[in-house]
């Protein structure tokens, strides 16, 4: 017998934003120490998303992380715009991120693309960067 759910979705409910409080990753010391919230928690989230290769870890959803392995050996004319798209797509999965803009690429180091950009979040703007190695 199938339960009657006709009025179930008609009930009044409210969607609330979950707090961003999380454990603080002290990257310089290499330890988890204390808690962080707000803009600093967003900086940590962005770091984690952009340093997790998508599809490589079973623990993460296929929507989490960024794809960079296939950029190895590709020409700069392909990598720079593709990296912009992939960064924006990867970060858009977090509902606290409003947008990604102001991309700049530094290709002065041979075989490496340094991409700097601004991330607009519900807590404020952050200047971030991503480095991708194209060859050794």
Image (spheres, grey):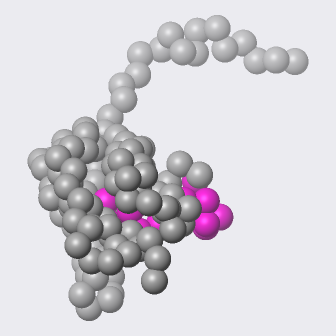
Would you identify the image quadrant in which residue 116 lies? bottom left
As drawn, 4 above or below 81? above
Of 75 and 4, which appears nearest the observer? 75
Q: Is residue 19 left or right of residue 66?
A: left
Of 63 and 72, which appears nearest the observer? 72
Q: Looking at the image, can residue 44 be seen?
A: no
At horizontal 54% and vertical 15% (from top left) the residue drawn is 9
Q: Quadrant of the N terminus?
A: top right
At horizontal 26% and vertical 67% (from top left) the residue drawn is 107
Q: Quadrant of the C terminus?
A: bottom left
Q: Is residue 123 left or right of residue 56?
A: left
In the orientation shown, which residue stands out farthest toward the right? 1
Of 124 and 14, which appears nearest the observer? 124
Count of marks overlaid on the render: 0
As drawn, 113 above or below 67? below
**Which x, y percent locates residue 11?**
48, 14
**Which x, y percent locates residue 14?**
36, 25
Q: Looking at the image, can residue 109 be seen?
A: yes
The answer to if 104 sits in the magenta stretch is no
Bounds of the magenta segment: 46-61
Would you identify the image quadrant in which residue 76 lies? bottom left
The answer to if 51 sits in the magenta stretch is yes
**Which x, y percent locates residue 80?**
34, 54
Q: Is residue 48 left or right of residue 19?
A: right
Of 6 and 76, which appears nearest the observer? 76
As drawn, 109 above or below 51? below
At horizontal 38% and vertical 69% (from top left) the residue drawn is 132
In the orientation shown, which residue stands out farthest toward the left? 124
At horizontal 12% and vertical 48% (from top left) the residue drawn is 124
**Which x, y percent locates residue 42?**
25, 57
Would you identify the image quadrant in which residue 38 lies? bottom left
- For the stretch drawn in magenta, the main secondary structure is loop
């Amino acid at each position: 017998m199938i339960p009657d759910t006709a009025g179930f979705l008609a009930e009044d409910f409210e969607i609330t934003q979950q707090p961003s409080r999380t454990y603080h990753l002290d990257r310089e010391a290499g330890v988890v120490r204390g808690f962080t919230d707000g803009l600093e928690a967003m900086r940590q989230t962005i770091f984690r998303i952009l340093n997790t290769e998508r599809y490589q870890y079973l623990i993460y959803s296929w929507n989490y992380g960024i794809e960079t392995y296939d950029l190895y050996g590709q020409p700069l004319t392909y990598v720079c715009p593709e990296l912009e798209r992939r960064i924006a797509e990867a970060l858009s999965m977090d509902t606290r991120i409003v947008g990604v803009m102001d991309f700049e690429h530094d290709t002065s180091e041979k075989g490496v693309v340094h991409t700097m950009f601004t991330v607009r979040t519900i807590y404020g703007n952050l200047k971030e960067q991503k480095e991708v190695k194209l060859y050794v």
